[in-house]
Amino acid sequence: HFTPERLKAFAAVVFLSTTGDVLDAAQQRAFEAYVEQGGGFAGVHAASDTEYDWPWFGTLVGAWFRDHTPVIPADVHREDGGDPSTRMLPEVWRRTDEWYAFRTNPRPEVQVLARLDDAQMGASGMGGDHPIAWKRRVGKGRSWYTGMGHTIESFGEPLLREHLRGGIAWAAGMQP
């Protein structure tokens, strides 16, 4: 249960494939204040399929889920080699996952860290520009999101674990 008092104990909150409406109105107010005042948020995969009726959360996560591919191999292109969540990744990272497309392209509002080769996405493409990991400041807080991490096997991948570790560390303010 999110309350102002409980959230104070955490540098960041991770939404690990949450889906739907997960917070009531009081919890939403507490979480919004927590982030706006300097708390961190890290969203993984289905976190972008959460809280559709809460506009502030849409800003926090950067973009809401629209649809996805089946589990297929695709090329992830690193855009920011200096970020703690992407600096260990190769320029082009071939991996298998369920790939999300989003209702809107977050690029105008966020710092894109990695994108997909949209030509590989078929009907789940995003018109040529397909961000898959990004970050942004929200008030005094930090928000980091990755669309990767659907399959159980994903969490056995050393590079994905390092991607998550770096993103959570950035969201928590432990990395510049």
Image (cartoon, rainbow, N blue to C red):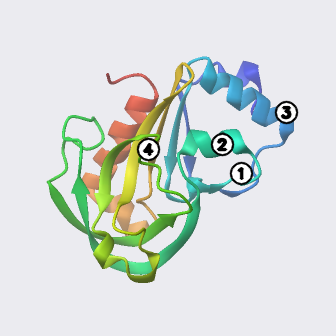
Disc 2 packing (10 Å; few <14; some 14–19; many ≥20): some
Q: Is residue 11 above or below residue 156?
A: above
Check disc 4 and give the amino acid type. Pro
Identify the mark nearer the N-term, 2 or 1: 1
Identify the mark nearer the N-term, 1 or 4: 1
Q: Nearer the viewer, mark 3 or mark 4?
A: 4
Return the residue at label 2: 57
As drawn, the label of residue 151 is none
Q: Is residue 32 above or below residue 114?
A: above
Identify the mark nearer the N-term, 2 or 3: 3
Return the residue at label 1: 51
Q: CA distance from mark 2 to mark 3?
A: 14 Å
Q: Quadrant of residue 48?
A: bottom right
Q: CA distance from mark 3 to mark 4?
A: 30 Å
Identify the mark nearer the N-term, 3 or 4: 3
Return the residue at label 3: 26
Q: CA distance from mark 2 to mark 4?
A: 17 Å
* Element carrying mark 3: helix
Residue beneath the point at 71% across and 44% down: 55
Q: Nearer the viewer, residue 30 or 2?
A: 30
Say if mark 1 contacts mark 3, CB within 8 Å: no
Return the residue at label 4: 108
Check disc 2 and give the amino acid type. Phe
